[in-house]
Structures are given as C-alpha cells and as structure tokens.
Amino acid sequence: MTSPSSKVTRYLTGITTTGTPHLGNYVGSVRPSVQASLRSDVQSYYFLADYHALIKCDEPARIQRSTLEIAATWLACGLDPQRVTFYRQSDIPEIPELTWLLTCVSAKGMLNRAHAYKAAVDKNVARGEDPDSDVSAGLFMYPVLMAADIVMFNAHKVPVGRDQAQHLEMARDVAQRFNHLYGEHFVLPEAEIDDAVALLPGLDGRKMSKSYDNTIPLFTPRPQLQKLIAGIVTDSRAPGEPKDTEGSALFQIYQAFASNEETEALRRAFADGIAWGDAKQMLFERIDQEIAPKRERYEALMADPSQIETILLAGAEKARTISQPFMSRLRQAVGLRSLATGAKAAAGKNTKVPKASKAGFKQYRERDGLFYFKLQDEQGSTLLQSRGFKTPQEAGRVIGGMQQTPGDFVNSYADLLEPVDNQTALSAVKVLEALANPTGDQ
Ligand code: TRP
C-alpha cells in the first residue's frame, strides 16, 4: 500500500499554470523531464499546479488558457499519460484536504521565513508601507500546499529549480513533524536540482524569464520564431570580424539544441567571423528542426481542448486511486474517524497514537523473571496470553509451532495459554493464518 516496492523511485513535479511555456522552460524542465519519465526504474507524477496559480493570478481566463497550453506542451513534447500520472491539481480534492492537516502541524515561524513571503514583506517595509500590504494568506501558505502536493504521492525526488529548494526543506520538515505525531505515513522528499541543465539566456542575455519579458514562446509559429531570434542582442562586430562565444546569448541557446559537433562548428564559425545575421539563421533552423514536429502536435492538441480534458480527467482518476485511500488513512490517523467503529482508548490527553500496529506476537519478560508472549490483532488488542516460560527460547518454540498449525493451537497448546472464549480463539486463528500466509498488502 504505502510502503512502495523499494526499487522504484517516485518523481513528482508541478508546473504553475500562469504563463505560456517558453524555450527556457523547454530546455530546463520539459525536455529533461520527458526523458526521465522514460526510465524504467522511475515512476513519474506531473501535474498542473492550478491552485498555486490562484496565488499569483486573479484572471480566470488566463489560468484556463495557461492550463491548456501547458498541458498541450507536455503532451506534444512526448509525455506519455499511459506511462506517467499526469493530472491537474484541482481535480484531486484530497490535496486541499491534506493541506489543512499539514497546516495544523506547520510552524508559523517557519512560514514567516519563506523567501517569497519574506520578499513581499521586505518590499513593503522598504517602501514604508504596511508589512502585509497586498500579501495574501495564500502566498503565506504556499509552501504547505506544495508540501501536500508532494507527500500525497510519497514522492522521493522532486526535480525543481534552485529557487524551490527552500520549499522542499519545508515539505520535509512538515512531513517529519506529521510522522512524529501520527506515525510514519510520509516519505521525506528530496529536491533534485540539476545545475547541469543550462539556464537558457533570453533575448537580452539575462536568464530567459517571464518577469524579464525576454522570452521566446516555445511554440510560436515559424515566422515569429525567426523574427524573435533576429532580435537576440549581439555586439556590433561586423561580418568578417572574429566573435566571442563567451557571453554570447546566441551561442548559448544554440548549444542547448545542438550536438557537440554542431556546437564546435559554430565555435569555428564565430572565430572565422560569421556575420550575426547568418549565425541567427543557423540558430533559427536548428531550433525549428527540433521544435517543428512538436509544434505540429501542439497545434492539433490546442485545436481539440476536450481531448486534453479527457486525458487530464483520466490522469486524475489514476492519481486518486492513491490519494483517496491514503487520505482516509490519514484522516483515521489524526482522529477524524467514524464514531460507529467505537472510540479507541482515549486515556490521557497526550496519548500517542500507536504506530499502525501490526497484528502479531509480542514477547516480553515479566517481573517474575519468566518469559511471556501474547498475540495481538491489528488494533493491538490481546487475543492470546501465554503462561510463563523459563527461557525466551521455549517461548519462541511455542510461537513457531502455533504459526505452523494455526487451526490446531487450541488443542496443542491449551495448557501453555490463558483460557480464551470461542470468539477470541476464532480471531486468533485468523491472525495466525494471516501471519502464516501474508498477503501482498503489508
Ligand atoms: N512551486 C513550484 C514552482 O513555482 C510549482 C509547484 C507546485 C511544485 N507544487 C509543486 C513543484 C510540487 C514541485 C512539486 O515552480
């Protein structure tokens, strides 16, 4: 169930649905992620973080449009929804539900230190405004929602940019705190920050980013792509003059798409004084060669949004086969429980909830110096109680014998056990049988 087969590593990542994917997103995230999703030792979860989008965007049409564009982009770039779990965050009602449980174990002081929130406060203070001016509680809670995204699927690895490293630390922190209070439910996730993945420069040479307004949209039509590339800043060296590859945005973008040999060829062309116009034409053709077939798929997908909707709903259904049962286990763990099943011993206010106590034998030594065992059911109630043995080995032999002949222990071992009623004996047989023949569940 939650203890996954140990050889698979679960990767999970979310993409906030506020913008149109650009070449930087493609090189830094989409392309490597799609490649990673093809590995057989990896289980991947990709989702459209539209709840996160609400934190920074109050334009409904833009959120819807961006969700469509990002979904179409991932599919056009080869993400296989059969192979991975690809879903929209807001289709998983267990996410906000878990967010609340985690909110209740998140230290406010920790959230005060979150970079994005702190930056907003610092900006207000610097301007002499109220520290919380224009700061929503959503921004403040951002790291908890993100933690819920991650631990809901017990992801081991979360590929993110360096700017998200703190959020991963917080997710670990919150998961750890929850585990400490309520038992080992969550894997502690790790950030996977790949510094080898080049940060693509934008049109002006700074990092390609929406906030610098220097991006090249990934699937802009061919003529626009050519026009945008023509606008990449270069220096004023004339044709025939040798050019520097160092610090050249054009060269760096080319490198992100080209093979080593192609890159070396362009390096020589720079040294030989290629004209900027010709270099730009080379870059344009090289990018278009990789993007054109994907652009075609993208356009087909964008023309049929209901197809994407169907894919996302199927993804949500797949995701919920995990999130629904897991959430009911978590509700149980924190005490949001059916009253019909009876309240469990609620002694003392700080009673620790026992760790999902498995049915089985417990051996112990009493003050009389003798060795005892008892058989417990899943809830930890005692079904059978042994008499005292002089050595732990003797007790162990009896336990072994009982497990070999579950149906027969009452006759064989009656004199070594405290008497039990029929009902309890039947329950004991069931537990013994389960122990002798464990299902794949545990
Ligand atoms: N905060 C991430 C970003 O802005 C998006 C995100 C939301 C995310 N939930 C996540 C990333 C969970 C990884 C895992 O890039």
Image: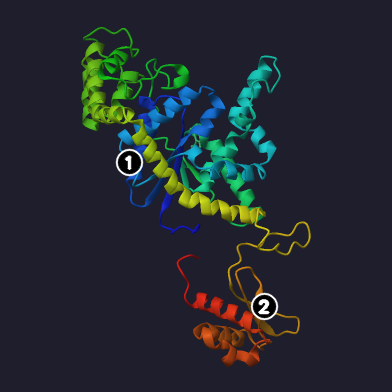
Q: Amino acid at mark 2?
A: Tyr
Element at badge 2? Answer: strand
Residue 155 marker:
none
- Position of 289 with respect to 372 (left or right) is left
The residue under the point 50% across, 24% down is: 60
Instruction: Report which quarter residue 205 is drawn in.
Output: top left
Instruction: Pick whichever, 174 or 165, lies toward us.
Output: 174
Number of labels in the image equals 2
Q: What x and y, as percent, mark residue 276?
A: 26, 12
Write the residue at 59% across / 56% down. 184
Which residue does the numbered mark 2 point to in the structure image? 364
- Residue 219 horizontal side relative to residue 286, left or right: right
Q: CA distance from mark 1 to mark 2?
A: 53 Å
Please state the horizontal and vertical placement of residue 16, each as a whole percent of the image. Answer: 48, 31
Is 230 left or right of 204, judged from the image as shown?
Answer: left
Which mark is on residue 35?
Answer: 1
Q: Residue furthest front?
A: 340
Q: Residue at x 58, y 87 (%)?
A: 398
Does the beta carbon of the residue at mark 2 sit less than 8 Å from ligand 1?
A: no
How far across and down, in percent of the image, does residue 320 sit? 47, 48
Among all residues in the image, which is located at the extreme right?
A: 348
Residue 120: image quadrant is: top right
User: Which amino acid, by three-letter code, is at mark 1?
Assistant: Gln
Q: Secondary structure at mark 1?
A: helix
Instruction: Work out whether 58 lies above or below 195.
Output: above
Residue at position x 70%, y 85% in the image: 370
Instruction: Indicate left or right for 295 with 310 as reference.
Output: left
Q: Is residue 317 above or below residue 256?
A: below
Classify mark 2: residues with Cα within 10 Å, few (<14), some (14-19) or many (20+): few
